[in-house]
Image: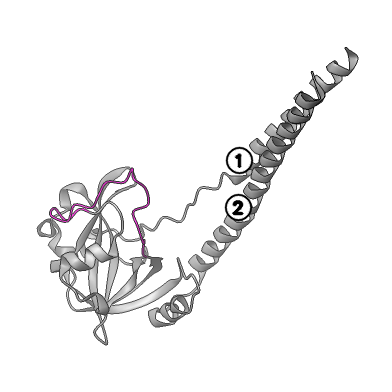
Amino acid sequence: MSAAKRLATAISVCLVLALLLSLGTWQVQRLHWKEALLAQIAERREADPVALSVVADKQGAGTDEEYARVRIEGVFDHSRERHFFATHQGRSGFYIYTPMMLAGGKTLFVNRGFVPYEMKSAETRKAGQVEGRVALTGYFRNRLSKKPSWLVPDNDLAKNIFYWKDLDAMVSSTGFDPQNVLPFFVDVDDAVKNPGGIPEGGVTQFELSNNHLQYAVTWYGLAFALVLVTGSLWWKGRRR
């Protein structure tokens, strides 16, 4: 092999090695971030609920309050509930997002929980359509700014079936003034027991995938294999 080819090969190997090492290091950084996030979620789950206004003010100031426990109080407008397609404990159905009218004129979309597929219509679960002012506890949830993936179907507003949490679509399809709707959601927790057991509260998903250690080992392993193969080829070339 000519000197020019050896140099080109050496440069290529170094570039690939640097790429593999950088990918492994990035996954380690992601691992630390994910572990901190999971610890934060666990801490917030165990915290005492605070007034919604306190958490909303922190969120407005730039702090991410996802999964913070909150207290809410208001009156549900069941006539304008939205249905989010979901599975819960192996069953297909819907999460029921119902607008709650708060004191002061603001509206909050509340995930009241899960209903089986055949109970999508509110007529099949009248007992759970609680009337009057209610006080509940739950978890602060961020809105989504866009569809999470092209694999997710578009929301079917005509049939009132949502496949992703598009707050703007929920607002427009119910006729609320967007200026009066709070820019986040609240999921009720499992302390909320509706008459008849439907909707079933406490459906918030806290489990986040954390495969970054596996990915880091993979990238570092490939880097190590590259070094071994390159060293072996270099040694055989020297012997020849």
Please give left or right for residue 127 compared with residue 207 in the image: left
Please give left or right for residue 231 compared with residue 172 in the image: right
Query: Relative to residue 210, is residue 75 depicted above or below?
Result: below
What residue occupies the far top of the structure in this picture? 240
C-alpha gap between disc 1 and disc 2: 10 Å
The rendered magenta stretch, by its main secondary structure, is classed as loop
Q: Amino acid at mark 2?
A: Arg
Name the quadrant containing residue 191.
bottom left
Within-10-Å neighbours for mark 2: few <14, some 14–19, many 20+: some
Label 2: element kind? helix
Q: Which residue is mark 1?
A: 215
Q: How is the image coloured?
A: one colour
What residue occupies the far right of the structure in this picture? 239
Q: Amino acid at mark 1?
A: Tyr
Q: Which residue is mark 2?
A: 30
Query: For the point 64% across and 55% down, which residue is it?
Result: 32
Magenta stretch in the rendered image: 143-161
Query: For the point 13% across and 59% down, which residue is it?
Result: 122
Q: Position of residue 180 (x, y in %)?
A: 25, 79
| Quadrant in which the N terminus appears | top right
Name the quadrant containing residue 169.
bottom left
> Mark 1 or mark 2, which has the lower sequence index?
2
